[in-house]
Image (spheres, grey):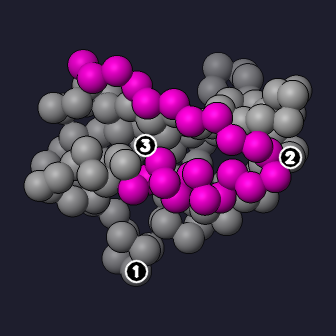
């Protein structure tokens, strides 16, 4: 398995939204981002390696008011993960309400 089929879409998505992508953890390949709100809640979005033409995308609260909520999962075809990644980010931003995303100026936030 490899991220080759989705890396371009992931890189474009992170750049467009001013996100910092982690690509390695504990000596293994990963794809995840952490997003925080102005209220200091922290959320994670992570992408599994594609398998059988599909890629799983997950989101969860890791610190704050949503940290005990169950994670949310999406399964999409590898040909077009971009729209699903945008949807996942919208969901996470809704979880932050009434706060808003903390991020660099001009990064699509």
Quadrant location, the C terminus = bottom left
Q: Is residue 5 left or right of residue 98?
A: right
Counting from the top left corner in percent of width and height, residue 77 is at 76, 43
Q: CA distance from mark 2 to mark 1?
A: 29 Å
Examine the structure image and report whether residue 74 is included in the region drawn in magenta. Answer: yes
Q: Do callouts 3 and 2 mark residues in contact (Cβ within 8 Å)?
A: no
**Residue matched to label 3:** 34
Which residues are the magenta region?
68-90
Nearer the observer: mark 3 or 2; the answer is 2
Q: Quadrant of residue 62?
A: top left
Counting from the top left corner in percent of width and height, residue 90 is at 39, 56
Counting from the top left corner in percent of width and height, residue 43 is at 35, 39
Q: Quadrant of residue 101?
A: bottom left
**Residue matched to label 1:** 106
Badge 2 density bin: few <14, some 14–19, many ≥20, Cα 10 Å: some
Secondary structure under badge 2? loop
Q: CA distance from mark 3 to mark 2?
A: 22 Å
Give the label on residue 43, or none.
none
Q: Is residue 88 left or right of residue 28?
A: left
**Residue matched to label 2:** 5
The structure residue drawn at horizontal position 77% and vertical position 35%, both measured from the top left corner, is 54
The structure residue drawn at horizontal position 81% and vertical position 52%, both measured from the top left corner, is 79
Badge 3 density bin: few <14, some 14–19, many ≥20, Cα 10 Å: some
Q: Earlier in the sequence, mark 3 or mark 2?
A: 2
Examine the structure image and report whether residue 20 is included in the region drawn in magenta. Answer: no
Q: Earlier in the sequence, mark 3 or mark 1?
A: 3
88 is higher (above) or lower (below) than 56:
below
Q: Do callouts 2 and 1 mark residues in contact (Cβ within 8 Å)?
A: no
Q: Quadrant of residue 76?
A: top right
Is residue 11 in sight in this rendering? Answer: no
Counting from the top left corner in percent of width and height, residue 89 is at 44, 53
Q: CA distance from mark 3 to mark 1?
A: 18 Å
């Amino acid at each position: 398995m490899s991220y080759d089929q989705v890396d371009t879409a992931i890189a474009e998505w992170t750049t467009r939204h001013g996100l910092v992508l982690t690509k390695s953890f504990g000596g293994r390949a990963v794809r995840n981002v952490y997003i925080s709100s102005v209220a200091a809640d922290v959320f994670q979005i992570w992408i599994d390696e594609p398998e059988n033409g599909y890629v799983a995308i997950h989101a969860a609260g890791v610190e704050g008011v949503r940290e005990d909520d169950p994670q949310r999962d999406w399964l999409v075809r590898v040909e077009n993960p971009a729209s699903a990644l945008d949807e996942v980010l919208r969901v996470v931003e809704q979880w932050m309400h009434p706060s808003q995303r903390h991020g660099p100026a001009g990064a699509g936030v």
